[in-house]
Image (cartoon, rainbow, N blue to C red):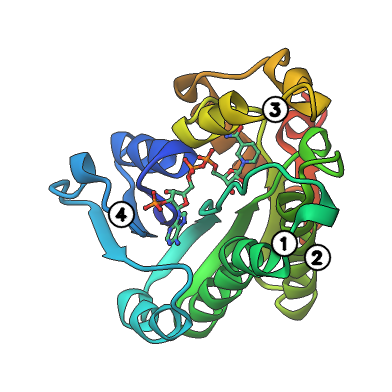
Amino acid sequence: MKTVFIAGVSSGIGRGLAEEHLRRGDTVYAVGQHEAKALTSHPRFHFMSIDLYDADMMRDTLRTFVVGQQFNRVVLSAAVYPDMRNMIDTTLDTLRYVMNANVWAHKHIIDAILSHTQTEQIVALSASPILFNHPGMGAYAISKAALNTLIELYAKEFPYVHFSAIAPELIQTPTFSAFLQEGNSERYPIIQRIRDSLILPLNQGIPKLLDAFEKAKRIKSGSFVEMKKLARPDL
Ligand SMILES: NC(=O)c1ccc[n+]([C@@H]2O[C@H](COP(=O)([O-])OP(=O)(O)OC[C@H]3O[C@@H](n4cnc5c(N)ncnc54)[C@H](OP(=O)(O)O)[C@@H]3O)[C@@H](O)[C@H]2O)c1
């Protein structure tokens, strides 16, 4: 049985991972802004509410939640999807807001995990190149590129923990669906390309993602890799 820590568990992929781990008999420590109400009464589910924007809370409260734990895996799933905008229309405030949630909050979590727990593997959910570097994806793309670099740097500093930044296949979650629905596909053609792509239902995506997390341990620590590459039989 595993003990895992998941950041961002009220909805989407993080919640799906928590449910699947509990179903498999594992213990889940989870943080997020809102509680995943259906899970809170589960005896192997431990939840602490945190706000990714509250650095003091992240540092101090998180320590008391995780101190002394041994985690087989830590999954950093929490993120915000900003509205699509060209770079010239993206304010520094928006960039700071997105970077705080998608990158710097994860640095606080990683620091607490490395300082106060024994952890085998840390996985950050990144994004595939189909979501990267297209007009409109500005703040989100920059945040995920920075997250990949953050993971690579920690891997070099902590060789006894396995780090990876994994781009999930497209998975149907409430936030991702809303993002696609609201996106202006005439102005931003990438929206139509994603809509036309294969988007896995959550119940198919989660087991595949868990397989990818296991296989990721065979690649070089600190790597950025797409989930679909990890599904190759030769890995
Ligand atoms: N779905 C996809 O196809 C896809 C594709 C590429 C990459 N990803 C990546 O996979 C991860 C999960 O995506 P998802 O689609 O499952 O998104 P999601 O459903 O929106 O989940 C994101 C999580 O982040 C948490 N969060 C957001 N703001 C927070 C805050 N201020 N404080 C604490 N928690 C906060 C949310 O909790 P609250 O609701 O409590 O705020 C939620 O549990 C993200 O990193 C995303 O970039 C997903």
Q: Amino acid at mark 4?
A: His
- The residue identified by callout 2 is 149
Tell me the kind of residue under disc 3. Asn
Q: Tag 4, which secondary structure?
A: loop
Which element type, helix, strand or loop, lies under badge 2? helix
Total marks in image: 4
Question: Residue tagged by mark 3?
Answer: 184
- Whether the residue carrying mark 4 lies under 8 Å from ligand 1 is answered with yes
Label 4 to label 3: alpha-carbon separation: 29 Å
Q: Is residue 47 above or below residue 175?
A: below
Q: Which residue is found at the position 49% from the left and 80% from the top?
A: 112
Chain-order first, disc 2 or disc 3: 2
Q: Give coordinates of residue 153: x percent, y percent.
A: 79, 73
Q: Provide residue 225's location: percent of width, then percent of height.
A: 79, 44
Along the line of sight, the residue nearer the viewer: 230 or 124: 124
Residue 34 numbered mark, or none: 4
- Marks 1 and 2, how far apart in space? 5 Å
Q: Quadrant of the C terminus?
A: top right
Q: Position of residue 155 (x, y in %)?
A: 75, 70
Q: CA distance from mark 1 to mark 3?
A: 26 Å
**Vertical order, 25 against 55 (above or below):** above
